[in-house]
Amino acid sequence: MIHLRRLTLAPDDDEDLDAYPFSVPAVRATDTLEFTADVTFFVGENGSGKSTLLEALAVKCKLPAVGSDDPHEDDTLRHARKLAAAMKLAWNGRVRRGFFLRAEDFFGFTRRLAMERAEFQRRLLELDDEYKGRSAYAKGLATGPIRGSLSALEKSYGADLDANSHGESFLKLFRARFAPQGLYLLDEPEAPLSPTSQLALLVMLQEMVAQGGQFVIATHSPILLAFPGATIWSFDEHPPRAVPYDEIDHVRVTRDFLAAPERYLRHLGT
């Protein structure tokens, strides 16, 4: 379901357009981006501006960030906040559900979950010692809230999210935090995922779109970019242009390399 339908950039007259992030060519040239599909991809080389615009969109939409500080307080998003101030959004229906997830934040989030789980377990062991010789009722009253918190954590993310592969952990986290009828902004979600896990994410996206989810995803992945019916905005164009799958450089280069890797490798001196 398309909740967000349009993004417009209109910097104030006194804004310094020669300063980052307005100096990024794709950002400087952007007037309007239309969201006409349930899944929209931003694609382009590193530094093309796709992640910058996605971060600003997260700030503007006031979406919570998974695994990092609130976007309005995160120091790494200070430039995104400037860009968000110049952004206007048009909605089919304003939504509050959803989240913003960057690949680098995911790794920190799993570590924090592991630390939180370990702290719950440590406190339970302490209470076992403190309540030796006392009634089961008294011990239950003391340990009940902690056991409840630990149970809720494990129900959402598994008994030990950090013990899984990065791909398994990412998919568990993504499914646990998803709620229907929401807007989800993902920055390079393929980073922790193997090709097989990327295919699993495609299946999850189809399921979540069927539940009213809308996705805007910055990616380099030819696998994710193949999502049926998606709109793909190329940030290598100024302004960004909606392009067909087969015209994307990432897709063309990957396809050519897999078809004849020796043609590329001979230039590496191997």
Image (tube, rainbow, N blue to C red):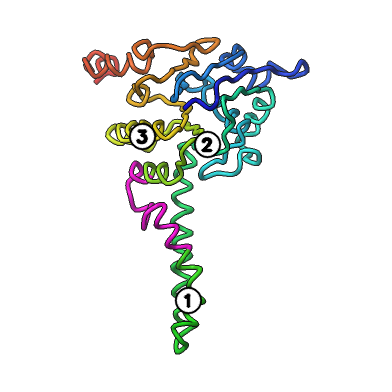
Gap between marks 1 and 3 measured at Cα: 43 Å
Mark 3 residue type:
Glu
> Mark 2 Cα within 10 Å, few/some/many (few <14, many 20+)?
many
> Mark 1 Cα within 10 Å, few/some/many (few <14, many 20+)?
few
For the point 27% across and 34% down, the residue is 196
For the point 61% across and 22% down, the residue is 90
For the point 65% across and 27% down, the residue is 84
Give the quarter of the image for residue 68: top right
Give the label on residue 100, or none.
2
> Mark 3 Cα within 10 Å, few/some/many (few <14, many 20+)?
few
Percent of width and height locating residue 148: 46, 65
Q: Is residue 135 magenta-colored? A: no
Residue 211 appears left or right of 257: right
Mark 1 vs 3: CB contact within 8 A = no
Question: In front here: 25 or 161?
Answer: 161
Give the quarter of the image for residue 57: top right
Task: Give the residue number, with chain letter if any, for mark 1.
Answer: 126
| Above or below 34: residue 134 | below
Mark 1 residue type:
Glu
Residue 22 appears left or right of 139: right
Q: Which residues are magenta?
A: 149-169
Gap between marks 2 and 1 measured at Cα: 37 Å
